Image (tube, helix red, strand yellow):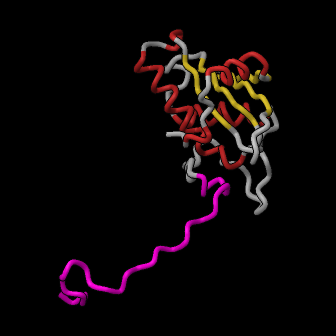
Amino acid sequence: MVARHYRLREDADVRRVRARGKAWPQGPLVARVLPNTLEPPRNRYTVIAGKRCGKSVQRNRLKRLVREALRGYHPHLKAGHDIAVICRGTVDDLPHLIDAQTVLHRIFTRASLFVADPDGGAPPAPGDPVRTGWSARAAGTRPEPSSPVLDSGSDAGGPSDAST
């Protein structure tokens, strides 16, 4: 599930991105990209699959595959864009995660959305395992919570020594 603050949720925002965003088509997907003015800068995403993509089961599968591919690329994209990914193919055109990763990699490369990592790392290649999440900590927007303080007392009257 995409974290709430990374979702493009308002209908007016989705319509604005679809109407005014720059289109980057590639095979069964089209990405519409529009700069946003959020502070702090962050990307927001939506995945759209119309009835031409098949029945609900097929549409939902397409959206899950595209969201999973987006999750891997999210930390490697320039911040400050609203991105609508529109599925225009069927499950036959995009059957596996590696296919979705390949198409999105081509789109983001053509759109010049990839940012070089400060550590010199490149964005993951299609087929690489997804190692990032949608959490705010993975994106570096929120500080790490402090380590929990453990109570040194015993719990509910039970033995406090670990040998039992």
Quadrant for the C terminus in the image: bottom left
- Which of these two is toward me, 59 or 79? 79
Residue at the spot x=79%, y=19% of the render?
Answer: 20
Residue at the spot x=60%, y=35% of the render?
Answer: 7
5 relative position to 106: left or right: left
Q: Is residue 146 magenta?
A: yes
Q: The magenta stretch spans which residues?
A: 136-164
Image quadrant in which you'd find residue 109: top right
How many numbered callouts? Answer: 0
Q: Is residue 159 above or below residue 25?
A: below
103 relative position to 131: left or right: right
Residue at the spot x=79%, y=37% of the render?
Answer: 37
Q: Is residue 89 above or below residue 139?
A: above
* Residue 48 on image: x %, y %: 58, 21
Q: Is residue 34 above or below residue 162?
A: above
Image quadrant in which you'd find residue 57: top left
Q: Is residue 122 magenta?
A: no
* Residue 149 on image: x %, y %: 45, 78
As drawn, the residue found furthest toward the top would be 52
Residue at the spot x=51%, y=25% of the render?
Answer: 62
Q: Is most of the magenta stretch helix, strand or loop?
A: loop
* Residue 79 on image: x %, y %: 75, 44
* Residue 146 on image: x %, y %: 55, 71
